[in-house]
């Protein structure tokens, strides 16, 4: 049976024209660029050219995501970064969750000069014990092929009324298993990150253990680095009750690096 590839309404990639500086915004696993739109609009009003791609496997059908790995997501992010670098001297990157891992890995790879990065709610340790211990087992044993995806059971926003962004209503076990491999790889790469870095997360994140902030902050070699801990948001901090704080903090950090 053919799997649908049409993009879900509201999940489309977006690009907002700017002048002399650019920002690449990368969404999280099972998410879409909609979770980066508020931040993108905020940066664009400050003069940034903003690009937010739809990463492979996302925004269509969960079965498409089940067939992708971190290498597919990284490849898409790399293409967009290089495209922006060809036209802008200053390119910034902000990524949410899995997008934060992509941001860190791109900074570590040094294939291009990154003006600064913002790793938002980026996992180094999962909050849920089942994710910490069962995902590696699912990967090694091949269980991810028998149970490729499951219904979501953890709310990712605390905002009244529930989710305000477009994403899958299921979690991909197969893609999450690849994310665990990528997370381990990025953790090893942290000492190679030297560009300015902002690390931000909520103390009550439902997906990522708050220890992740200190692991990233303490692991990178950046001379300029800041960490911010929020108090009222869950995991998807770019659309939750403190989204204004997130957007303004990212903007101010980026502006200090110009």
Image: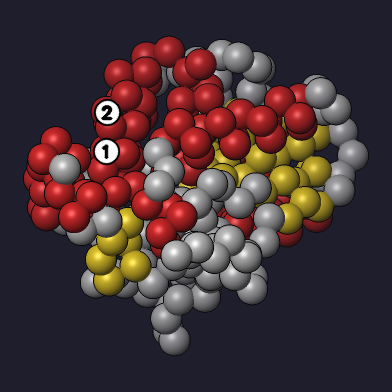
Question: In the image, residue 53 lies at what x, y percent?
Answer: 65, 48
Q: Secondary structure at mark 2?
A: helix
Residue 162 position by quadrant: bottom left
Image: 104 above or below 50: above
Q: Nearer the viewer, residue 31 or 61?
A: 61
Q: Circles 1 and 2: CB distance less than 8 Å?
A: yes
Drawn side of residue 187 relative to residue 244, left or right: left
| Residue 89 shows in the view | yes
Q: Say which residue appears at 34% left-offset and 32% top-offset.
A: 182
Image: 141 above or below 236: above
What residue is pinned by disc 1?
A: 180
Q: Say which residue appears at 53% left-offset and 25% top-offset.
A: 106
Q: Residues within 10 Å of mark 1 (few under 14, many from 20)?
A: many
Q: Secondary structure at mark 1?
A: helix
Numbered tag placed on residue 184 in the rendering? 2
Q: Nearer the viewer, residue 214 or 106?
A: 106
Question: In the image, residue 47 lies at what x, y percent?
Answer: 83, 46
Image: 229 above or below 12: above
Drawn side of residue 181 relative to residue 86, left or right: left
Q: Residue furthest toward the right? A: 19
Drawn side of residue 247 relative to residue 140, left or right: right
Q: Nearer the viewer, residue 209 or 72?
A: 72
């Amino acid at each position: 049976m053919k799997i649908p590839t049409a993009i879900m309404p509201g999940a489309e990639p977006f690009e907002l024209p700017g002048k002399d500086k650019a920002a690449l915004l990368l969404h999280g696993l099972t998410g879409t660029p909609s979770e980066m739109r508020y931040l993108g609009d905020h940066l664009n009003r400050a003069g940034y050219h903003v690009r937010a791609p739809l990463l492979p496997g996302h925004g269509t059908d969960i079965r498409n995501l089940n067939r992708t790995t971190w290498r597919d997501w990284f490849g898409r992010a790399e293409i967009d970064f290089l495209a922006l670098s060809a036209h802008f001297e200053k390119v910034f990157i902000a990524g949410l969750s899995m997008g934060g891992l992509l941001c860190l890995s791109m900074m570590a790879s040094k294939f291009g000069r990154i003006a600064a990065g913002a790793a938002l709610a980026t996992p180094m340790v999962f909050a849920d014990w089942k994710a910490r211990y069962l995902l590696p087992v699912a990967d090694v044993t091949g269980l991810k092929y028998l149970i490729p995806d499951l219904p979501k059971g953890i709310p990712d926003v605390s905002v009244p009324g529930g989710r305000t962004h477009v994403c899958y209503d299921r979690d991909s076990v197969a893609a999450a298993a690849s994310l665990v491999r990528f997370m381990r790889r990025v953790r090893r790469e942290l000492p190679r990150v030297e560009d300015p870095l902002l690390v931000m997360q909520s103390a009550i994140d439902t997906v990522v253990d708050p220890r992740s902030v200190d692991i990233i902050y303490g692991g990178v070699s950046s001379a300029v680095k800041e960490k911010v801990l929020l108090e009222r948001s869950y995991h998807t901090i770019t659309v939750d009750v403190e989204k204004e704080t997130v957007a303004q903090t990212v903007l101010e950090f980026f502006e200090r690096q110009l």
